[in-house]
Image (cartoon, grey):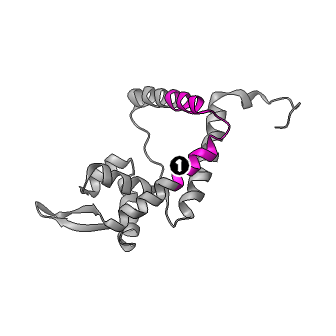
Amino acid sequence: MSTGETATPWEGLPSWLLGQATTHAQRLVGDGFSSVGARGYHYRLLATLEAYGPASQAALGRRSGIHLSDMVAAINELAEGGLVERTPDPSDRRRNIITLTSAGRRQLRRLEKRLAECQDELLAPLSPDERRQLTDLLSRLLHHHNRRTGPTEEPRR
């Protein structure tokens, strides 16, 4: 909307504004990750493995918020790139343990750098204090709804 135009009734609604901001954020992050040969799932899995250490696919899915039906394909992509290793669980051979490799750590550093650049681009018009305030408000909103209904299930891709 250009200066002087009258806003439509929905353009001032928080839900609409959040949706539009989300669209921009997803596009920026998706393009940023794509520029280094990755997807959002890759970042979430690598970061979760670094934070928690080796894990079963089920535990990794729960911790990263990725639906189990999407885990196998995402882990296959990471394993094919040498970013994770999949080995049988010694205590239950039916289950695999996923481990971050040194190449996976290097890729995670690249993804973190791109993610920081995307955050800066998305939030460019905001001061550091406004960025913290926005993050605090969004965290509070998300916490409220997660407490009421549980975390939102990751959409199927």
Q: Percent from the top left, x then y, of residue 155?
A: 48, 49
Q: Percent from the top left, x then y, of residue 28?
A: 61, 52
Residue positioned most to the front: 128
Q: Percent from the top left, x then y, of residue 36?
A: 52, 65
Relative horizontal placement of residue 156, taking residue 124 as reference (left or right): left
Residue 21 sits inside the magenta stretch:
no
Residue positioned most to the left: 91
Residue 32 in sight: yes
Q: What type of secondary structure mainly makes up the magenta span? A: helix
Q: Is residue 153 above or below residue 80?
A: above
Residue type at mark 1 is Ala
The residue lying at 39 percent from left, 51 percent from top is 66
The image quadrant where one finds the N terminus is top right
Q: As rendered, which of 43 and 128 lies closer to the eye?
A: 128
Disc 1: which residue: 116
Q: Quadrant of residue 94?
A: bottom left
Q: Percent from the top left, x then y, of residue 120?
A: 59, 45
Q: Magenta segment, which residues?
A: 114-137
